[in-house]
Image (cartoon, coloured by chain):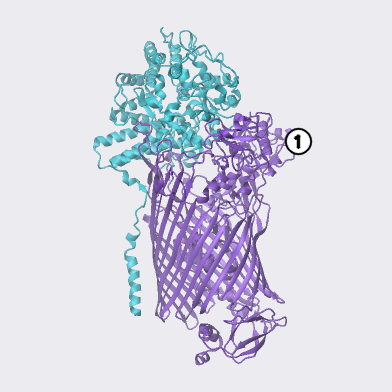
Amino acid sequence: MKKIFLFISTASLLMLGACKKSFLDVPPQGDAVTIDKFSNAAGVQQLLVGAYHDLTGIDVKSTWWGTSGTNWVYGDITSGDTYLGGYATSPPHQVSDAFNIENYQELATTGFLDDKWTADYDGVARANGVILAATAATDMTAAQKNEAIAEARFLRGHFLFDAKKMWNNVPYVDENTTNFTSLANTANIWPQIEADFQFGYDNMNEVQPLAGQANKWAAACYLAKCYMFEQKYAQAKALLATIIASGKNAQGVKYALVANYHDNFDVGTENNSESVLQINFSVDPTSLPNNSNLGETGVSPVGTAADVTYGYWKQPSFNLVNAFQTDANGLPLLDASGNDLSNATNMKNDDGIASSTPFVPYQGNVDPRLDWSVGRRGVPYLDWGVDPGQDWIADQTFGGPYLNIKNMFTQAEEGIGFGGIIADYYYVGNSAVNYNIIRYADVLLWAAECEVEVGSLEQARTYVNMVRSRAMTSPTETIDYSSGSPSANYKVGLYTTAWADQTYARNAVRYERRLEFAEEGHRFFDLVRWGIADTYLNAFIQTEKTRSVGSVLSTATFTKGKNEYFPIPQQEIVLDPQLKQNPGYN
Amino acid sequence: MRILRLKFSGKIYRSVLFLLIPLFCFQLANAQSLISGTIKDETGATVPGVTIAVKGTPTATVTDASGTFTIHATTNDILVISFIGYQTQQILVGNQTKLSIALQTDTKGLNEVIVTGYSKQSKRDITGAVSTVSPTVIEQTPVTSIEGVLQGRVAGVVVDGQGGPGNPETVRIRGIGTLGNNDPLYVIDGVQIRLGTAGGSEDISNLLNPNDIESLTVLKDPSLEAQYGSEGSNGVIVITTKTGKMGPPQLTYDGYVGVENPRNLPDIITPQQQADALYASYKNSGVAIPGSVASFYGNGTTPVLPYYIIENQSGTGNIGVAENSPLANPSLYNQGNYRILKANQSGTDWWSALFQSALTQNHNLNLSGATDKSNYSVGLGYLNDQGTLLNSYFERYSIRINTAFKIKPWLRFGENLEASFASQNTESRSATNDISELYLLSPLLPEYDIAGNLAGTGKALILGNTGNPYTSRVNSLGDKNYSQSIIGSIYGEADIIKGLTYTNQIGFQLLPTESSSYTPTMPQEPIPFPTNVFSEGGDYSTDWRWLNKLSYTTTINQIHQITAFAGYEAEEFAERSYGGTTGNIGFPSTNTEYLSSGNTGTSPTAYVPTVYGSGEKYTSVSEFANLTYSLYDKYLFTATGRHDGTSKFIATGEYGEFGALSAGWRISKEAFLQNVSWLNDLKLRASYGTAGNNGALATDAYLTTLTSDNFGNYDLGGTNTTSMSGYYVYQLGNPTLHWEDNKTVNIGLDASVFHNSLTASLNWYNRITDGLILAPPSSGTVGSALSPIENIMSFTNKGLELEISYNSHIGDVKFDMSGNIATDKNNVDYIDGLAGAYLPGGTFGSNGAIDLTRSVVGKPVSQFYGYVYQGLYKTPAQVASHATEGSLGITNANALGNPMYEDRDHNGVINTDDETYLGSPIPKFTYGYDVNFYYKQFDLGLFFQGSYGNKIYDYAKVMQEFPNANGTGVGGLTTGALDTWSPSNPNASLPIFSENSSAINSSPSSYFVESGSYLRLKTAQLGYTLTKLRGIKKLRIYVQAFNLLTITKYTGMDPEVNDGNPSDLGIDYGTAYPISQKFLVGVNMGL
């Protein structure tokens, strides 16, 4: 008997030893999805969708505003076109980062900047994941792989471009990068960004199965945008001419301006002939809130009338609204040299006037794009009713009397689920309205810039008039939503005579960009690439300080050679000592 | 029988006698005679108050003042002589009628057998640092969990209670060893306990009824921890449960009922004072009062409290109106979007609404007994702890069955099994909970609206930051959280040759948990759900562990004592969690709330049901061996080795070796000390060993994992109302990960003097942890994926521990006392460059974006970090001369009454460069002191416990002292907040009310740092033992009070603030339960 036990014990010990190796070989369980499962057609597609998602800017670590794919914090409130707006609590803690950015007081430790950096490089990482998976896939044809890799490189180009324009000195990361703690940011990465777009232009399909996908012409447009930022006007001019001649959107429709300017900002008319690349937001239960325009949460006055008091950030500036004034010919208020006179006086507004006090809006001529860009008292705010002024504004002394409008859905659209209050109090204004990263009007006005710099002023005038012509024929706010007389004296005209000189032409083109793309997140980056950010913005600050919102900009001053680019986030320098801080921030 | 008895004598007699007790029980009782006797102690003095009982009968008596007694007994009776601090003696009456008995000092403390898990050792032979909690303490401490048993009893063991029924308490042995998992390993009846990792981790207090504990040993030392190898580095708590003792069946009942009263509830100011404070705050900051606030308070220059509050969901938000306002016409009332509430101008006492006196009760029945062939112990326990927080409770039923059988003289089988069923509803301590939200709830809000529906905070922020926690507690009434467990082991032991024993044990754990909750749409809350929602889910974990062990013991020539064991162990842990949600239930009630009962409906009340599931599984194998050698009972050596493998790691990290060496020298056995009569035992010992920790590490940390959710989905089709699923990298893997590696040196001294009445144990240790497992802060250049988990830090903990106990008597008042004190000095030795210069922890500020603590090389872990508060600007001269604080929004114009911070770099500007280390959450020492007095049938016990030298960061002050806390427009200001600076109150203790939140309540500073030292009278107990009761062997009744007295300078609710997260150490987030005083009446009864 005892011997039996001795035997059992010995056998048990031996048995344990024998099965030891395989016993410890436990595969991951449950929903642990590991990278090795994605090297196939289906996996590549899933990763590609994930990479596209990052166009929204909303990743796991995002802070909504700080990472918004629409760049309103970095491109609008810094540009003289927009105030941060909102409440005057000095400043509200949760938006102090945005407040500091508005005043050019951001620091390397400003949290939004590290979030933005992370969001851009997350996009890069997701694109790189697609490239690696597609390269290793065995069930895809060479053509399929090529298309997937080209789309991924296009997206990588987008995110690197975004980082480049924010910080200028940024590290290059591709699918072969493994050591992230010793990447330098001293080399100029424009060549690598160009290469990604060139690869996309050469390899992507012209027509794509899905409306939200980018195609080869989107890559061409983005390549042209690179040239614009590098002041490579000759190369840009040639490429833009090709795009204007042959470019098509991802459905194969030839690029053209849409008849109604507002169609660029409406849920019902997305991915149209003017769309080059849009962020395709959606309001659907499975991806709420993170595939809606979460980055502009609270930015629009939305929902029912009661919710209006929650949407108050990103308010258009006096300066911007004044720029929409036109003369008797419907032309901007430029003098003979092309100098901007529009801010000599402040356009009539309801600043400081209670909603209960009668108010007649400005009766002078304005460009009709004003009321598709800005909500102002006395004018219908889409179909939400006539803007009552102060009642819809959190605090006029902090953000002025105007409301943002371009990312706003209509009340009717909310009714069918394109926006509204979903899931959480703070997500008021989940919007499915797409944001245009590039639209065809960009292409035309870049082409106009190129003509001014290295080509024909007359051709430039032609391009600008194409854009103005659409503004002339677009329906105006009043016609869409109210039966009464026009809310304003809309007057926009073409430049009918040749431009006097290059300076005037340059100013006219730049002015047109400001009007056409107001509140679309581009303005600050345009000012920087034109090299006029310091003079323009310091002048803006001086003017604006005399107005009722002046105290908000009390600490604002733009330092040449510093504020053109944002500081490299301190956290990144701590973790990667190879990164050099941008000039002026040390 | 007689023959058998006569064969034994002397010492052997006493021990064998015990085995024979049941045999005597069957003997016929003989005629009684009167026995008398005298009892003396070891010095020859007579001892009064000694209990003399006739075994197995209710007959008992005590010695009188002269130490004499008389008692009736028969010749076959056994007298049991017991007296605290002395050995209990059993004496067969036989033919004696006059007895003279000498008490012998109880040396049980030394001869006590320590269960170290894989083996047992006599305490006097142990060469490592080990502490035990005596069975008396366990029996007399009516706590609901074993953490409660440990608190303050063991040097070097720190327990932080969270408060709240059934909430786990944190147990830390010898300080913070890692920034990851610091929980000790529990070993119950030889089986390592797995508390689960994924969805529903179990709490040890759910699994084990403390009443079933027979012995509790804390292994603090590497020479012992090394036996558990990769699991041992946080210390090991070895528990054995009750087994039957030789004798007839014994039935015991232990129970108590009591009441718990919340104390120290905050004293909130009136609604008018609160509105005034808010207005002052705007005014002082030169900020216009926001329109919604101004109209709520009457649009005047001073706030006028509204008579009615209208919550208009689709209209203008919350507005305040006067009594006669047509807007308050009850006919307008609509719960969905037009609620009318009568403002409570005198103020609702929300704290009293949420915290009330609560009943607690605990009942335990135990039946046990043993023969020479078998023993058994069957326990039944019931605990019901109604928490002081509204609708909170913890209820547990438990059954324990332990049996053992001797099949052959050389073959034994047995099992230990506990099944428990626990249910609870509680608030745990997290960053925010219903308690912290209470600070942000306006006292102007009534409990109910005019229609009798629960009041919510409505749509505007002015009544509360988020929802109404009272509503949330009321709605949680039906929420269920069940934890069930079956844990135990079955074993067989065979003596193969003399001294050699083979053990085969299978340990098993089944731990299902289940929870469900129903959430109504709650239109009165800021975030009404479009539909009602019901969720239900569970988690099921299983763990088996197979142990094979050979142990050998022998003594050679009475000189060499050798004990050795070696074994092999394999384990598999598996866990699955699952659940789902449904919504839009048409007729919610407890009968219809099933996952199948949702109605998906149509827009806008459509609800898309969801399901989820996940799983984990890991395995481990281990080989281990241990050798103990004792030479002349004077020189002691122990060696331990263990080789562990786990599926959690791959490549080189998969296996780890751990080991220990220790030695002891019993100096008291040396010739030169033989004549020192007062010295009973003196032992010097030293040990060195290694152990590991892989704590709460996920099973697939070596793999890069992806996920698909709304951070990956994208509307690539351009539909606006659907999106395609996309995947993204969630966490990067690290294939080179390995165990945290712990190396400890321990030097100790054990002494026993004065007839063993005074014993002391001193330990010094140096504990080094290398390769701490942690996910470092991630580089944004990698993207948003979580960083791979790395072996990234090193720590040192050094400390001294002293435990002393003493027992004696003064006249017939006997007493025993024991105290312990321990220091632990933590130091961060190394941080990998991957993590940057420091590791941040804690959160501060309304969006939690500011780090409150830093772990940096050269300092203890998790030091508070921020500005140095220097008081308030009281004069313009101070403003002019002090460094400017522009970065905090303090300008020369508005500085008066605002905080001054130290300009540490003397550059005239306050900025982040002026932040510094503000103190340590780690105590300089912790201590416990226990004293018990016995007089006749009375006993009185007092137990003190505390900590010294630690700091607490009182985050709750943000909500208690500043209006508009967290930018909400409200703050449940406490009355202390009224002492705020103003020109007319220049010597105020608090800064000026200001909207400039970055000036103080968003800037971490020493303003919030307070002393966390405390001394607490944890328990006081008075008992009375009744004797001479027919049919009852023992009956003791007692009353006990908890938390009668706390001496502390800390101004928060309770200085026990730690929730177990090492990077949140010492931060009081305002989420703590108010301390409660508990009063119990209890009974210990034996039949």
Q: Position of residue B807 (x, y in %)?
A: 66, 73
Tell me the chain of label 1. Answer: B
- Chain in purple colour: B
Q: Position of residue B770 (x, y in %)?
A: 48, 55
Q: Position of residue B206 (x, y in %)?
A: 50, 60
In this view of the protein, which residue sits in the foreground, B524 or B20? B524
In this view of the protein, which residue sits in the foreground, B496 or B200? B200
- Is residue A559 visible to the viewer in this orientation of the structure? yes
Q: Amino acid at mark 1?
A: Ser
- Chain in cyan colour: A
10 Å crowding of disc 1: few (<14), some (14-19), many (20+): few
**Looking at the picture, does residue A131 appear above or below residue B1026?**
above
In this view of the protein, which residue sits in the foreground, B4 or B184? B4
Q: Quadrant of residue B43?
A: bottom right
Q: Quadrant of residue A540?
A: top right
**Looking at the picture, does residue B589 appear above or below residue B1043?**
above
**Looking at the picture, does residue A530 appear above or below residue A501?**
below
| Left or right: B17, with B1037 as reference point | left
